[in-house]
Amino acid sequence: MFSSAVNNKSIGHKFIKSDSQMLNQVYGTDDVVPYWIADMEFPIASPITAAMQNLVDRETYSYEFDSKSVFNAISDWNKQRHQLTLNPDNFVQVPGVLSAIALLIREFSEKGDGVLIQTPVYHQFRRLIESAGRTAVTNTLKTENGRYVVDFEDFENKLKQGDVKIVLLCNPHNPVGRVWQKAELEQLVAIARKYRTLIISDEVHADIIFTGNEFTSIIEFGYEQSISIIGSPAKNFGLNSISNGYIYSDNPELKQQINSTVSSMSLDHGNAFTTYATIAAYQQGMPWFEAFLDYTQANRDWITEYLTVQLPQVKFYQPEGTNQIWLDFSSLQLDSTELKSLLTQKAKLALTPGTWFGEIDENFYRLNFAAPLEQIQASFELLNSAINQLQN
Ligand SMILES: Cc1ncc(COP(=O)(O)O)c(C=O)c1O
């Protein structure tokens, strides 16, 4: 099911990740294998295709939006996967996760206010904050025993100063692959509660959790100033270009406020393709999703084993969740131009530069491993020989 990529040869140029112009712009060449966007390389689950095929076969697209079924399907899924109780009445639908964040920032802060992010973090966060005229306040993650952790002292200091109106959390964390543990979130919530700071938690990667780790939603803490964006089938079902964003809060006032803004802009009008795809994914997609998760966990294990044994010069951070791995090439001791040339020209890899995520050190790159293993293996062999040539 996952061993081969979608036959994208004739349509590849339509996708951002493999668009030739885009690749040339970012990497100076289009002769690279795309690992830079969090976008899977597999055909989607067949019940989703069947649901969309059904829709096409009806040959009519009258107004319809069955939000109740969508919210019920998302709630049932979360109950099953995470033992998380979400009230279907407490969702608000918007066109996507990023539009949800953009809207919530505008709704719950003023121009000039601070929005806290934990760098290195998904690069669009900063763009959304700054384009709304707010200030991105960074609470840089620190590393302890080869693992990223929250710098709570700095976090509290930033909140204490009073400019931060929103904490924008990424859980699981893209790009460092942490799945924040209950105790860590508890500490974070306790500090936010102390300063009455709103937490917005982007939980789009919530389902991609590897063995030994457990996803905890921000909703579980009963903190009334918290909002989750949970339930988008973008990352877990590969529906990036057709999925919605689902905003969730158990606080009736927050939910009401979000709802009235969203509906005043008619942003809640569903698209039938998204609606049917989402329902099919969450109602019938479990077997496919479990196979997908097993497959990508095996990819992660292959990569980490390969790096440990064959390429110890490349340091990695063990992904606990997400299909992203965070790599550190600093031991190669190349300057940023040499490193970029090694990765793109010699190893033919399109990786996301860590600097996009607010990482100062130019030796960091992110790789998306939701791709066929044979392709990944070939890429790592090429990387290995490129590094060996360098050292000979
Ligand atoms: C943490 C995070 N949030 C949001 C998105 C994008 O969400 P959407 O395309 O639904 O706006 C991504 C995509 O990679 C992501 O990693």
Image (cartoon, helix red, strand yellow):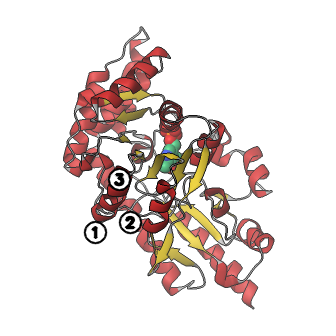
In the image, farthest residue toward the front: 161
| Few, some or many residues within 10 Å of mark 2 (<14, 14–19, 20+) | many
Q: Residue at x 58, y 53 (%)?
A: 137
Mark earlier in primary sequence (2, 1): 1
In 3D space, how far apart are the residues under numbered discs 2 and 3 (Cα atoms)? 29 Å
Identify residue type, mark 3.
Lys
**Secondary-structure class at tag 1:** loop
Is 241 drawn above or below residue 290 in the view shown? above
7 left or right, relative to 51: right
Q: Which residue, given by chain and number where applicable, does mark 3 sit on?
A: 194
Report whether 9 appears left or right of 345.
left
In the rendered image, the residue lying farthest to the bottom is: 392
Q: Which mark is residue 63?
A: none
Secondary structure under tag 2 reads loop
Q: Where is residue 72 drawn, in percent x and y?
A: 24, 30
Q: Is mark 3 within 8 Å of ligand 1?
A: no
Helix or strand or loop: what does disc 3 sit on?
helix
Q: Which of the pair 65/379 is nearer the observer? A: 65
Contact, mark 2 vs mark 1 (Cβ under 8 Å): yes
Between discs 2 and 3, the one toward the N terminus? 3
Q: Is mark 1 within 8 Å of ligand 1?
A: no
Query: Which residue is nearer to you in this view: 372 or 209?
Result: 209
Nearer to us in this view, 105 or 383: 105
Answer yes or no: is residue 283 visible. no
Of the residues shown, which amino acid type is indicated by label 1? Gly
Q: Residue 320's mark?
A: 2
Marks 3 and 1, how far apart in space? 31 Å
Q: Amino acid at mark 2?
A: Glu
Residue at image point 23% right, 38% down: 86
Name the residue at 74% across, 73% down. 339
Name the spot of residue 251 as percent of width and height, x first.
28, 34
The residue that mark 1 highlights is: 212
